[in-house]
């Protein structure tokens, strides 16, 4: 009597998927590590570039503070690692796509690939808008309210946390058109319903802006207004990609 040591087909397939997933994750992590090592000699320059909008708004000669013992080293290190992740993000998402794509239908592949590419572009566009437009106005606006007797010198760790949160907020906010298009494309909500929800979206945009941005009107407007405009952009695009309505009468007649 012989016994087979070959695992069942389902178990073998599951193990092979786990091995492939591990390989994809290792490749993604290595890409971030390689870019990080390449950027490491320029850690100071990268942090100076990140802090430039604030330094322009502050009086000449003002410097940021580092209250921790290892903060002058750790914060530029975190900034460089964050930059490496952003630069490697397209390749990381490509690895995710390569793992998921074999299990998708052809029409799903045609839809998913443009969505992923557009999502990356819109996320970077939101960060670019935040860096060049929002920071330029917000930092100057906040610094202008400081009394003469107060020396404005923010801590670099708090500054990095603030910038990271703002980047994520604006990057995700610029994904609004894609969310609207997906809702219409998969039939979750029709274009008419999305248009009818416009007043609620406007109110919600200002609520979100009040929560994620500093407590000043200018920064809230700089987030709420683009959110509303991007929602309108999503509505215009959704008209062309919305899931076609099924005629109930013709369907029942055919049945």
Image: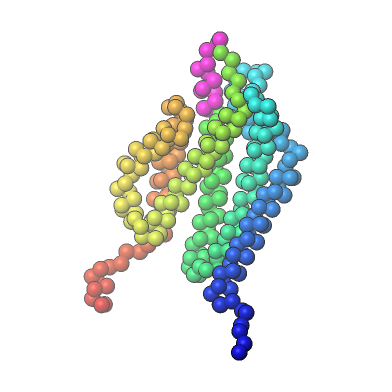
Is residue 107 in sight in this rendering?
yes
Horizontal side of residue 113 vs 156, given as left or right: left
Is residue 49 in sight in this rendering?
no
| Residue 168 picture location, percent across and down | 52, 41
Quadrant of the frame with the C terminus: bottom left
Q: Which residues are magenta?
A: 137-149
Extreme residue in the bottom direction: 1
Quadrant of the frame with the N terminus: bottom right
Horizontal side of residue 64 vs 120, given as left or right: right
Residue 147 lies in the magenta-colored region: yes
| Residue 197 picture location, percent across and down | 31, 46
- Image position of 104 with respect to 235: above or below: below
Nearer the observer, 200 or 242 = 200
- Image position of 220 with respect to 61: above or below: below
Nearer the observer, 234 or 16 = 16
Q: Residue at x 32, y 64 (%)?
A: 245
Q: Quadrant of residue 238?
A: bottom left
| Residue 61 picture location, percent across and down | 67, 18
- Image position of 245 with respect to 167: above or below: below
Q: Residue at x 53, y 56 (%)?
A: 116
């Amino acid at each position: 009597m012989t016994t087979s040591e070959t695992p069942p087909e389902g178990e073998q397939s599951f193990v092979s998927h786990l091995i492939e997933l591990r390989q994809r994750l290792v490749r993604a992590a290595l890409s971030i590590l390689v870019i990080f090592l390449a950027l490491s000699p320029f850690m100071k320059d990268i942090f100076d570039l990140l802090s430039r909008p604030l330094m322009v708004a502050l009086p000449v000669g003002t410097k940021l503070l580092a209250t921790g013992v290892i903060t002058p080293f750790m914060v530029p290190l975190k900034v460089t690692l964050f930059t490496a992740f952003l630069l490697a993000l397209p390749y990381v998402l490509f690895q995710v796509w390569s793992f998921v794509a074999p299990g998708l239908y052809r029409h799903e592949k045609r839809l998913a690939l443009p969505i992923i590419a557009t999502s990356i572009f819109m996320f970077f566009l939101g960060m670019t808008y935040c860096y060049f437009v929002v920071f330029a106005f917000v930092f100057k606006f906040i610094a202008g309210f400081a009394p003469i007797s107060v020396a404005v010198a923010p801590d670099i760790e708090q500054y990095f946390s603030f910038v990271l949160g703002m980047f994520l907020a604006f990057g995700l906010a610029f994904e609004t058109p894609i969310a609207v298009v997906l809702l219409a494309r998969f039939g979750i909500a029709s274009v008419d319903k999305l248009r009818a929800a416009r007043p609620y979206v406007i109110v919600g945009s200002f609520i979100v802006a009040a929560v994620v941005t500093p407590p000043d009107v200018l920064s809230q407007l700089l987030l709420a207004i683009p959110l509303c405009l991007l929602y309108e952009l999503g509505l215009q695009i959704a008209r062309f990609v919305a899931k076609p309505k099924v005629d109930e009468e013709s369907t029942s007649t055919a049945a």
